Image: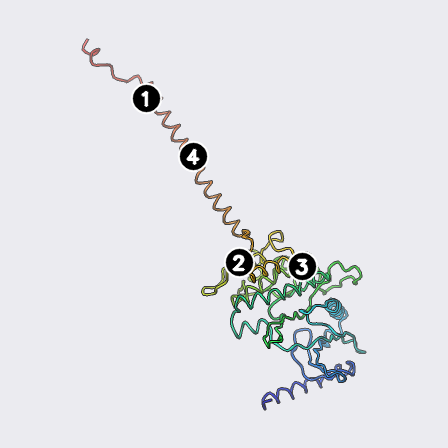
């Protein structure tokens, strides 16, 4: 450990000592350092004193922990995440509320880097590596959907690539079901003002589905769209839609077809079709389940082409071309008939003209 790293560690440990609420956590957890702090919560690295296993402990910041609605939202996250048992999902190991009503969540500690960090530092992934990662993501989120949980904030920052047996960072773990929603959970308490619910726009605009932006009732299809945007980012090194502000980005998600990959980016036609179909605007055009996405991606690993189903914007363009051609042909036919009618009219006028000249023999008489 270098001197600067040691100083950062000491400061991180010191940060954990200024919040007395952290002392209310179960005694078996020894806090090591603050990993990061977001707008609503903070994550700490901790160690179980009895097993020496490291965990990530997420807490709600005190100013939000005092709010009953925010605590309820945190509990909803814990309930959703705890229901998920899949090797591709970061496991929740414990959950509770301290005496001072501070909720906390104990999760597996992950060693690795996020997909966003990998692409930002190493550039777009090879198609082979990317497809292997996409299949794992789709499998993990598909499991969540079967458990009636939708993530609603799937993005590269929430995909952690952990070291596998070959010391390659290709083992996927999905994290942060912070705005997840239990689908048709009749046992859940009625949503309160300020909680995530139908009609609220919540998520990350760069990877948000048109349905999420519109605030309509959501299902697993919203995660499929976000996966499409995530796949685009992984192959292109940038999100599919960018803009000057969130409203600009959200408008493009709702109205614009997926843009072609940037110049110089090589993506096979088959993988492009999978990515763009996942990003279809209308639910009827998009993949229905993550299993469908996985099936298509596995075909690519075997060198089998996916179905060449026309994308909606291609169909729209073809339809426009047909309409233009129909107008042209219709106009040509109409002009032809008009010209024929005019010609017939002129011929009839010539045949009935009284000024027609008499033969020469008759004039001599």
Q: Which residue is mark 1?
A: 350
Q: Residue at x 63, y 57 (%)?
A: 292
**Quadrant (top left/top right/bottom left/bottom right) for the N terminus:** bottom right
Disc 3 to disc 1, C-alpha distance: 76 Å
Residue furthest out toward the front: 302
Q: Which secondary structure, mark 4?
A: helix
Q: Is residue 334 left or right of residue 14?
A: left
Discs 3, 2 touching: Cβ within 8 Å: no
Residue 306 placement: quadrant = bottom right
- What is the spatial separation of the Cα atoms under label 1 and label 2, in whole angstroms? 67 Å
Q: Is residue 175 above or below residue 197?
A: below
Q: Which residue matches tag 3?
A: 220
Instruction: Of the two numbered discs 1 and 4 on the same chain, state the one appearing first in sequence.
Output: 4
Query: Where residue 270 is drawn, which disc sits there?
Result: 2
Q: Which residue is mark 4?
A: 333
Q: Viewer-nearest of labels 1 and 4?
A: 4
Q: Position of residue 163 (x, y in %)?
A: 62, 76
The span from disc 3 to disc 2 (Cα, nearest Å) is 23 Å
Gap in angstroms between the C-alphas marked 1 and 4:
26 Å
Task: Give the mark toward the camera: 3 or 2.
Answer: 2
Quadrant housing residue 48 = bottom right
Closer mark to the observer between disc 3 and disc 1: 3
Q: Which numbered disc, 1 or 2, marks the residue that appears first in the sequence?
A: 2
Against 339, is 203 above or below?
below
Report which quarter residue 104 is drawn in. bottom right
Nearer the observer, disc 2 or disc 4?
A: 2
Sequence-wise first label, 2 or 4: 2
Give the answer, above or below, for where 77 lies relative to 339. Answer: below
Marked residue nearer the N-terminal end (3 or 1)? 3
Disc 2 to disc 4: CB gap under 8 Å: no
Which element carries disc 2, helix, strand or loop?
A: helix
Local SS, label 1 = helix
């Amino acid at each position: 450990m270098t001197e600067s790293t040691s100083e950062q560690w000491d400061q991180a440990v010191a940060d954990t000592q200024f919040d007395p609420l952290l002392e209310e956590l179960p005694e078996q957890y020894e806090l090591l350092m603050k990993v990061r702090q977001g707008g609503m919560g903070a994550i700490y690295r901790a160690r179980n004193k009895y097993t020496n296993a490291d965990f990530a402990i997420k807490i709600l910041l005190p100013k939000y922990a005092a709010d009953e609605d925010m605590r309820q939202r945190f509990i909803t996250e814990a309930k959703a995440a705890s229901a998920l048992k899949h090797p591709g999902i970061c496991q929740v190991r414990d959950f509770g509320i301290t005496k001072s009503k501070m909720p906390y969540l104990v999760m597996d500690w992950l060693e690795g880097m996020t997909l966003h960090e990998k692409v930002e530092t190493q550039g777009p992934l090879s198609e082979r590596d990317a497809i292997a990662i996409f299949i794992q993501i789709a499998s993990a989120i598909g499991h969540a959907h079967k458990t009636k949980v939708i993530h609603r904030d799937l993005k590269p920052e929430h995909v952690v690539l952990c070291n596998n047996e070959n010391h390659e960072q290709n083992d996927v773990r999905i994290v942060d079901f912070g705005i997840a929603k239990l689908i048709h959970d009749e046992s859940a308490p009625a949503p309160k003002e300020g909680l995530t619910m139908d009609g609220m726009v919540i998520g990350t605009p760069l990877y948000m589905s048109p349905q999420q932006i519109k605030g309509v009732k959501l299902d697993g299809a919203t995660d499929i769209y976000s996966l499409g945007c995530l796949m685009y980012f992984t192959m292109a090194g940038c999100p599919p839609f960018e803009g000057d502000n969130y409203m600009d980005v959200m408008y493009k998600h709702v109205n614009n077809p997926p843009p072609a990959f940037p110049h110089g980016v090589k993506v096979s036609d088959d993988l492009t079709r999978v990515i763009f179909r996942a990003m279809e605007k209308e639910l009827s055009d998009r993949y229905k389940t993550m299993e469908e996405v996985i099936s298509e991606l596995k075909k690519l690993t075997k060198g089998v082409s996916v179905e060449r189903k026309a994308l909606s914007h291609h169909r729209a363009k073809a339809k426009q071309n047909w309409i233009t051609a129909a107008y042209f042909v219709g106009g040509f036919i109409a002009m032809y008939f008009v010209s024929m009618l005019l010609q017939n009219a002129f011929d009839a006028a010539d045949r009935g003209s009284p000024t027609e000249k008499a033969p020469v023999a008759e004039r001599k008489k």
